[in-house]
């Protein structure tokens, strides 16, 4: 199994989830501007979409799209999902909201200029994170241990710090709690992101 990622991109969520699962896997960075992998290969040969994450399974099949990759990881490692008849659906519900609303709202932040759009994006993101904070009643989204949805939320909170998006004290505590987990530290070290869980000065990899 091999994960293609770009440092500090949303693929960090998949990297963390795989580390949390404790399974062996290869990882290779991708330059999203040149579309070349760290070993010099053409990333288009992995996925024509040209963006991360891409997870090549042991069967040779390739999974793309963050929600799909995280859902697959959770399906293989139930400790990263939620039990019960609606467990998987609830995780997908949160993953979908993070992907379609929060993640998308960051788009203006990654581009120079567009100051008016960035002001609007910060306001939208503050409201979206507020909605998540309202539902955070325990250490993690679904109880006392993290799911794949927590991995994705953590990355979005790193982005929030980078772009000075205000979040609640409960989400700051959540970010710090996740940032202290061994699996998170390993993934961030692998991506060259050591000690940034509470430091907003990092640039996105792609």
Image (cartoon, rainbow, N blue to C red):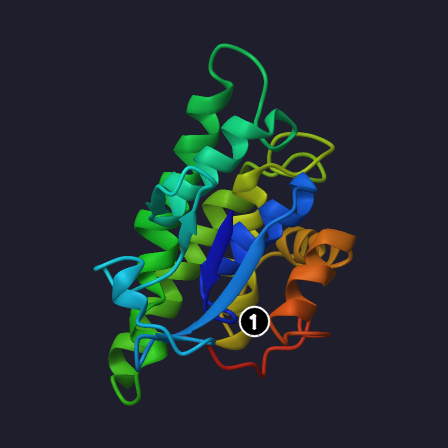
Asked whether, in this view, residue 15 is left or right of residue 138, the answer is left
Asked whether, in this view, residue 75 is left or right of residue 140, the answer is left
Residue most extreme to the top: 85
Element on which disc 1 rests: helix
Position of the C terminus by quadrant: bottom left
User: For residue 192, which quarter of the picture?
Assistant: bottom right
Vertical placement of residue 86 versus 120, above or below: above
Disc 1 residue crowd, few under 14, some 14–19, many 20+, Cα 10 Å: many
Q: Nearer the viewer, residue 41 or 79?
A: 41
Q: Residue at x 57, y 56 (%)?
A: 26
Where does residue 158 sit, x and y in percent of width and height? 56, 66
Q: Residue at x 61, y 30 (%)?
A: 142
Residue to which mark 1 is pinned? 161
Residue 196 visible in the snapshot: yes
User: For residue 141, which quarter of the picture?
Assistant: top right
Asked whether, in this view, residue 103 is left or right of residue 152, the answer is left
Q: Nearer the viewer, residue 169 or 205?
A: 205
Where does residue 63 sit, x and y in percent of width and height? 36, 44
Where does residue 182 sit, x and y in percent of width and height? 78, 54
Residue most extreme to the bottom: 113
Q: Residue at x 44, y 42 (%)?
A: 57
Q: How many numbered markers are drawn?
A: 1
Vertical placement of residue 80 versus 163, above or below: above
Where does residue 157 sit, x and y in percent of width and height? 55, 61
Residue 181 visible in the snapshot: no
Q: Residue at x 70, y 52 (%)?
A: 178
């Amino acid at each position: 199994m091999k994960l293609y990622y770009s440092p500090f991109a949303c693929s960090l969520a998949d990297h963390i989830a795989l580390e949390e699962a404790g399974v062996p896997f290869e990882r290779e960075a991708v330059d999203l501007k040149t579309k070349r992998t760290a070993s010099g290969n053409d990333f288009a040969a992995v996925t024509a979409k040209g963006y991360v994450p891409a997870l090549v399974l042991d069967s040779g099949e390739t999974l793309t799209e963050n929600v799909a990759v995280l859902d697959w990881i959770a399906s293989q490692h139930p400790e990263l999902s939620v039990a019960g008849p609606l467990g998987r659906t609830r995780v997908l519900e949160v993953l979908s909201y993070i992907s379609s609303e929060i993640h998308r709202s960051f788009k203006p932040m990654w581009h120079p200029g567009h100051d008016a759009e960035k002001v609007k994006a910060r306001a939208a993101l503050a409201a979206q994170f507020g909605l998540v904070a309202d539902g955070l009643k325990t250490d993690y989204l679904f109880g006392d241990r993290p799911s794949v949805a927590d991995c994705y939320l953590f990355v979005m909170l790193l982005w929030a710090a980078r772009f000075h998006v205000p979040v609640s004290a409960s989400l700051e505590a959540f970010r710090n709690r996740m940032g202290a987990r061994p699996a998170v530290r390993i993934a961030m070290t692998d991506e060259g992101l050591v000690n940034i869980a509470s430091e907003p000065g990092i640039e996105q990899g792609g």
